[in-house]
Image: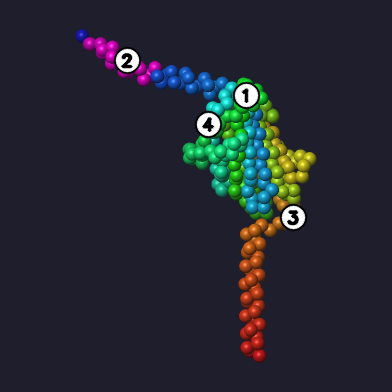
Amino acid sequence: MRRRPPARAQTWVVGPVLLAVGASAIVDPVAAQETVLSARLTADLTAADGSAEVRVEYRVRGAARGSTIPASVLDFGPAAAEDVRVGGTDVPLVVRAGAGVSRETDVPVEATDREDVGRVVVRYRVPSVVDADGGVLRGRIPVLTLDRPPDEAGPGLFLARLSLPAHWQVIEGFPTGLESVSEAGVHEVRLSVVPAMVGFRARTGGAWRPDLPLVLDAVAAAVVALFVLAGWRHLRREAA
């Protein structure tokens, strides 16, 4: 006859299972109750060095003030988010390596004028947004995204507003729908989902502004040219 295990042994076997089930019952409903009401991104690319200052703001239903929400951001080659900070307090955020090109962090929730809605604000710098693709400029802006579903998918869920140099002519946007508004150099796109990246292709329209490295190169070339000219004149005097 098979002997039944003692009651104490059953407790050790079943106990951890009950704890795991209890933990999931506590954590999962909280995350499920938090939904994104809106996401707003502003990016200033008017600096001459090809960088961008980015600000992302989320409004989250069911998020309590002082809690944190998991977030992630992807690196698109040299276009990567740096100096990530909490928008309201300017406190640096610890960003961890994730899977592949993903990086992860936990962002704090701030209070709003509604008790059932919290706010998440994050700022970061992308030092290398723009690169040259032949005669066209290509820009890629990583979007920090929250690990929470949308409250309701609609055209106004996500809004991106890009401030570009006024002489740039945007010829293509990603996602599609990036359009200029009344302000010079400002372009917007509205989407029903939050993308991992906002991109564009643009031409400079014939306008040209030298940046600092190019100016330094020009100065160095001018100095070399002066030395060559002086040496050439000296040789001519010696020959005469």
Q: Report which residue position mark 1 lands on.
A: 117
Q: Residues within 10 Å of mark 4 (few under 14, many from 20)?
A: few
Residue kind at label 3, given as amino acid type: Ala
On screen, residue 234 versus residue 28, left or right, reads right
Q: Residues within 10 Å of mark 1 (few under 14, many from 20)?
A: many
Q: Earlier in the sequence, mark 1 or mark 2?
A: 2
Q: Which residues are magenta?
A: 2-18
Identify whether 1 is placed above or below 201: above
Disc ID at residue 207: 3
Assess whether residue 177 is covered by the magenta stretch: no
Q: Earlier in the sequence, mark 1 or mark 3?
A: 1
Disc ID at residue 134: none
Q: Residues within 10 Å of mark 2 (few under 14, many from 20)?
A: few
- Residue drawn at the location 36% of the way across and 20% of the way down: 16
Residue kind at label 1, given as amino acid type: Val
- Residue 68: percent from left, percent from top: 53, 29
Separation (CA) of disc 1 from disc 2: 42 Å
**Nearest-to-viewer mark from 1 and 2:** 1
Q: Earlier in the sequence, mark 3 or mark 4?
A: 4
Residue at disc 4, secondary structure: strand
Q: Report which residue position mark 2 lands on.
A: 11
